[in-house]
Amino acid sequence: MSLPIYRFRNFRLDPQARELYKDDELVALPVSTIDCLVYLIRNRERSVGRDELVAAVWGRADSSDVSLSHAIMRLRRLLGDTGNEQNSIRTLPRLGYRWIVEPTVEASEARSAEPPTAAAGPVDAPMPAPTPASATPATGGRPRIRALLAFAGGLAVLVAIGFFLVDRRPAPRATVPMVAERRAPAMVLPAQVEASGEWAWLRLGFMDLVANRLRKGNLVTTPSESVLGLVNAHQLDAGIASDTGSKALLIQPRVVLANATWNVSLEARGDGRTVLAEGQATDVLAAGRAAADQLLVKLGLSPPPSEETDQSRAAEELDRRVSAAVLSGQLDVARALIKDAPAAVQASPEIALSTSVIEFFAGEYETSRKLAESVLDRVPADRNPRLRARALNRLGVALVRLDRDTDADAAFVEVIQLLRLQNDPDLLAAAYTGRGVVAGQAQRLDEAAAFFGQARMLHEMSNDAFGVARVDLNLGAVAMDRGQPAIAAPIFSDAADRFRVLATPEALNSALRSLADAQSMLLEHDKALATTDRFWPVDTHSRNPREGWWLTLSRAVALAGAGRLRDADDLVARIRASSDPTTDAVVRIEADALAADLALLRGDHARAAALAGKALTPELESTNWLDYEGAWTTRIRALQRAGDVTSAAAEIKRLRAWADAASGDRRSLYVELLEADQARLEGSVEPALQGYAAAMTRAERLGIPEDIVVVGQSYVEALLAAGRVEQASAIGGRLAPWSSQDMRASWVQAQVYQALRKDDAARAALERARQLAGERVLPATTASH
C-alpha cells in the first residue's frame, strides 16, 4: 500500500521512502530521526510520550532515550525550533512531545517494494525497529561465544570499577580519539537552556564559558562574538558540520536543571562524526567545566591545569580528569595528568585509585588489585564511605579478571552495605552490576538479570545515559547466555550506536564484539568480517596486550567464518607465538580450540582431534562451558571422520555424563547429535534417524540458526543415505532461509535438489556453496538415489 506524503512550510516528507525534502532538496538525516518525525506527525492530534516514541521507533520500550533526545534535537535544529520558540515540536513537561503544525496531506505514487516502515497495517501503525547493522560469522563447526564486556558506573565511577567480563575474557578497547591534532577551529554555539527564566543568561554566558575553557586546553576556538554573528545571520548551526563534511568542529551546549542538579552536555560535530561530553554538578559552572574538560580529553587534548587550591578538591578534580582520559582510551594523557600534578596530590588515595584504573586498562590486573587494596588500607569506612566504595568496586572488577569471583562478590556486597544510607546511585549501580556479572559467570541468569535491572534503574535515576547503555550491554549478555542471539543483537547494536556518539572507544568495541558474537550464531557471515574491520588492526585500537589478543582471536573467528582459513591460521599462530603463557593462558586455550576447528574444516582430522583435546582444560570449562563443549564436539567429530569409531564412542560416553551433570537444552543438543552420528557410523540406521529427529526438535525449539544448520546438515545426509528423499526435502526446507549466506545450508540444498533430480537447481546451489566455502572443504557429495 502507498502512504500519504506530508507537506508543511517548505518541507516535504515521504514516510514510505523515508525522505525529507527542504525546498526540494533532500535533507540527510538518520532513518530513526525521520521515523520520529513521521510518528509525531501521524499522531499530531495528541501528545506522544517519550517511552511510546522510543518503543515505536527503536522497538524497545526499555531502551535509553539518548537516541530519542538526539533525534528531537536534530529535528528542532532543522525546523528552526529553539528552547524558547517551539513552533513545530512542543515539549509537554512530564508528558512528551506534540507536533503542532498542521500539514497538507497528499497521496503518493504506489511502489513495488515498500520499506520496513509500515510495510503492512494502517497508516498510523507504529514503525518497527531498524535492522541492526553489524555481525560476525561462526567458524562452521559449532557456536563460539567470544568475550563479552560489561560496564558499570558513571564517568569517574566507570573507570573506578572498570569493565567486567561475562565469560571472564577481556574485550577490545580502542585508543584513537575522535580527532587527533585538530587544526580547524572549534565554534561553540549558544547554549540550549532548560531552566527557569532567571537562568536565561546562560544561553550566551555558558557559550563563552565553554569556549574559554576549550581555549585554555589548547583547542583553537573561534571568539564567541564571531560565532554569534554567524548564528544571527543564519549562516551557522550545529547541523552544518556533519551535513557538509566540514572539518570545523561545531559544539552545541545543552544545560538542564533537574532536581537541583545541573546536567550539561556538549555535542561536538565535525569531520562527519559526533562526540558527546557530559558534566554534572550542583553548580552550573562546575558542571560546564567538567563537560568541557571531558570533551578536551576525548579530542586527545589535556584540560587546563586545575585552579583548585584545596588539596582534597584538587585530587578529586584530577581524579575526574584521569577518569575521562581512561574512558576515552587516552592512557598516556591520563599518566601525564598525574605526572604533572603536585606531589601532595599525587600521593592522595584518590590518585592511587586513579593509578589503579590506568593499570587495569593497561592489562596489569594484579597491579590494579594491589593499588585498590592499598587505598582500602588508607580509607576507613567512617571517614570517606564514597571513596572506600569506589576502591571496593575497583577491587571487585580486578578480582573478576583474576578469576576470583567469590572474593569479587564479597567486595560488591560490602559496597551495597556501605552505601545503604548514602545517596550515590552511580556507585551503587556499579556494585549491582558487579554482582550481576558474578551471577552471570555462575549461570545464575535470573539472578544476574535482577541485579542488572537494579543497576539500570539507579542509572536512570541519576540521568546517566552511559550507565544505562552499559547495563543494556550486560542484559544483552544474559540474552546470549539464554541462547537468544536474536534478542541480544539489537541490544548490542543500539549500545554500539550510543557508545559511538559518546566517543568511548573501549565501550564501543566491546559492544561491537558482543554484536559479532550474536550475529555469528545468526549466520550473518558477510557482516561479520566488516564488524571486525571496525576494530582492526589491533595495534590502533588497544594498548592493552591482554585485550589485544582477544581482538586478534575475534578477527580470526571472523576470517574463518568467511572461509579465509590461511589468514585465520596466521592470527592463531601469532597468538601462540607472542602471547604470555601465564597472563594470556585462556586466550591461548581458545586459540587451540579455534585451530582445531580450522583443521576440521580443512579435513585434517588427526590434527583437529589433537588440538581439540589440548583445549579441553579445566580453565576453558570454568570460563566458557559452551566453547568447552564445542571443543569436545570438534574432537569427537574428528575421531569419527578419521574412522576411529571406538575412541569416538568412549568420548561421547564421557560427554554424556558431563552434560547430564548440569541441566540445559544446549548441553544436551550436541550430545544427541553426536550420539546419532555414532549410531549411523555403527550401522544402526533407525536409532540414528530417531536421534537426529530429537536433536532437530530441540534445535528448533531453541531457535538458534547455527544449531539448526549444524543438526540439519547431518540429518539430511542420513535421510538421503537411507533413501528418504521426501523427509530430507522437508528438513532441507527448514535450512533454506540461510542458504544464501551459509555454506552448509547451501550444500544441503544442493544435495536435496540432486536427490529430487532437479539438476539445474542442484548445480546452482552447489556453485553457491563453493563460493561461500572459500578455503573450506565441502563435504563429499551424497550418492544419488
Image (spheres, rainbow, N blue to C red):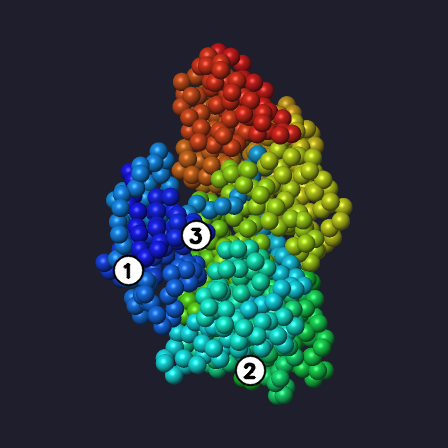
The residue at 33%/52% (across/down) is: 38
Give above or below for 635 relative to 16.
above
Among all residues in the image, which is located at the extreme front?
A: 233
Residue of label 3: 27
Q: Residue 359's x, y, as percent?
A: 68, 66
Name the spot of residue 742 as percent of width and height, x first: 52, 32
Amino acid type of disc 3?
Val
Is residue 446 found left or right of 212 in the rendered image? left
Q: Where does the N terminus fall, quadrant-wise?
A: top left
Q: Quadrant of residue 731?
A: top left
Horizontally, residue 132 falls left or right of residue 775, namely left
- Three-letter amino acid code of the residue under disc 2: Asn
Q: CA distance from mark 1 to mark 3?
A: 19 Å
In this view, the residue farthest toward the left is 45
Amino acid on which disc 1 is placed: Val
Image location (x, y in percent) of residue 693? 43, 28
Residue at image point 76% right, 46% down: 577
User: Which sits earlier in the primary sequence, circle 1 or circle 3?
Assistant: 3
Q: Earlier in the sequence, mark 1 or mark 2?
A: 1
Q: Which residue is mark 2?
A: 384
According to the picture, the residue beneath numbered tag 1 turns out to be: 101
Q: CA distance from mark 1 to mark 2?
A: 54 Å
The residue positioned farthest toward the bottom in the image shown: 310
* Sequence order check, earlier mark of 2 and 3: 3
Dot 1: what SS? Answer: loop
Q: Is residue 394 visible?
A: no
Q: Tell me the SS state at disc 3.
A: loop
